[in-house]
Amino acid sequence: MSRTWVLDTVDEAVAGIEDDSTVLVGGFGLAGMPFDLIDALIRQGAKELTVVSNNAGNGQVGLAALLKAGRVRKIICSFPRQVDSYVFDELYRAGRIELEVVPQGTLAERLRAAGAGIGAFFCPTGVGTPLAEGKETRVIDGRGHVLEFPIRGDVALIGAHRADTAGNLVYRKTARNFGPVMATAATTTIAQVSEVVPAGSLDPEAIVTPGIYVDRVIRVDARQYTVQGAR
Amino acid sequence: MALTVDELAARVARDIPAGAYVNLGIGQPTKVADHLDPKAGVVLHTENGMLGMGPAALGDQVDPDLTNAGKVPVTELPGASYFHHADSFAMMRGGHLDVCVLGAFQVSVTGDLANWHTGEPDDIPAVGGAMDLAIGARQVFVMMTLFTKNGTPKLVPHCTYPLTGIGCVTRVYTDLAVFDLGPSGATVRQTHGITVGELQARLGTPLTM
């Protein structure tokens, strides 16, 4: 789609997400987590989802709430187990969710590969470990590599700081994390932002995600949440 | 005397070259930052997309959009930069980080690392960036106690826990000794309150000086 739609409501933003979709969810812990889009997805009702995200939810909000609502069949992530991942832990131990653990850098690169049209790539991470079992390997320049395939999403839900009406995005600090690669890797990329400004107001030199990757934008109010470890 | 965790962190910090780009793993390795000389210009990398990470944020400094790999709020130093995850891990795999310091369940004398999964049936596997760091950083330092609470050695002939990486650890800093690791095994660099003979007896593995 060539044009980014700036929508009025978060429910419009997630309209049309189908059952059995693969949904890329941005964020690292709670930083960059698209809370409002996930809440809207819960209301929207799509189920049997495969979710790709770094973590498997924290506390009861965001991705954890989607899991708790029983909409996720499988999660592909690098670090499910955390002090506050009890929603996931319970589902996993009850055998009610499938887990694929991927090294964090390989997760990012598989998403990048999908967005960049790469068929597969050889990666040195994980050679000789349980996470490389059953995968094709090759020695290149004397070093072992594992063949890794792209992860493409039907939908990406990401959190960014500011959008312009052309869909260009900028992020804020470490909340950037997976947003830029996920934006490239999905058929439909939906961004929630704190502010939408007219095209021409963002410095073109400073744009992180060009609007070509962004299909829908929704402005939401900044959410207050506490961070783990905050003193 | 065996080193305390803080003394061990200070010992690791002494071996980090001035101006190095460094990633400190979650847990004990984070403490190394407290012992780096600010004048040495060591630049800290955090896997979630930042170079130039500063100390933990306190009070009003806390910003939910600025955390470290352990999701703890941190600060930024002058010269800091932000980047996305694919770039952050390209820095690791591409050999751009000089040093990373990781914790471990077990390290083999030839530098195999096990630090992500106990392999117990009820343990939920979670790897994060451990495998990428282990094979990516130019030097991989491990910081750990030499024995478990039950007295079992953590420097072993062969790891029994699931591996994180093969032959990737170059040096191990422990409360009782510092070792260099390589294809020919473990070499003792320094001991703390224990003789090499006692070390060898308790570890049950050949060591060279």
Image (spheres, coloured by chain):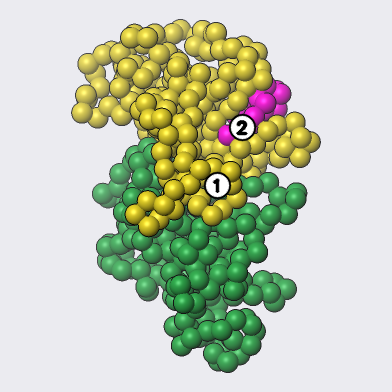
Chain colours: A yellow, B green
Inspect the magenta stretch and tell me whether residue B59 lies in it. Answer: no
* Magenta residues (range): A62-76
From the viewer's side, name the closer residue of B131 and B55.
B131
Hey, which quadrant is residue A56 in on the image?
top right
In the image, is A112 to the left or to the right of B69? Answer: left
Q: Residue extending furthest right?
A: A94
Asked if A220 appears above or below B208 in the picture, the reply is above
Q: Are marks 1 and 2 on the same chain?
A: yes
Crowding at label 1, few (<14), some or many (≥20) Cα neighbours within 10 Å?
some
> Dot 2 corresponds to which residue?
A75
**Where's residue A152, x and y in %?**
48, 25
> Dot 1 corresponds to which residue?
A132
Assign a secondary structure to mark 1: helix
Whether residue B145 is visible to the viewer of this picture, yes or no, is no
Asked if B103 appears above or below A71 in the picture, the reply is below
In the image, is A108 to the left or to the right of A208? Answer: right
Asked if A213 appears above or below A118 in the picture, the reply is above
The amino acid pointed to by label 1 is Ala
From the viewer's side, name the closer residue of B62 and B41.
B41
Chain name for mark 2: A
Q: For the residues marked 1 and 2, what is the alpha-carbon distance in whole angstroms?
A: 18 Å
**Where's residue A27, x and y in %?**
49, 33
The residue that appears at 35% across and 68% down in the rendered structure is: B16
**Where's residue A206, x and y in %?**
24, 30
The residue that appears at 58% across and 43% down in the rendered structure is: A134
The residue that appears at 46% across and 77% down in the rendered structure is: B184
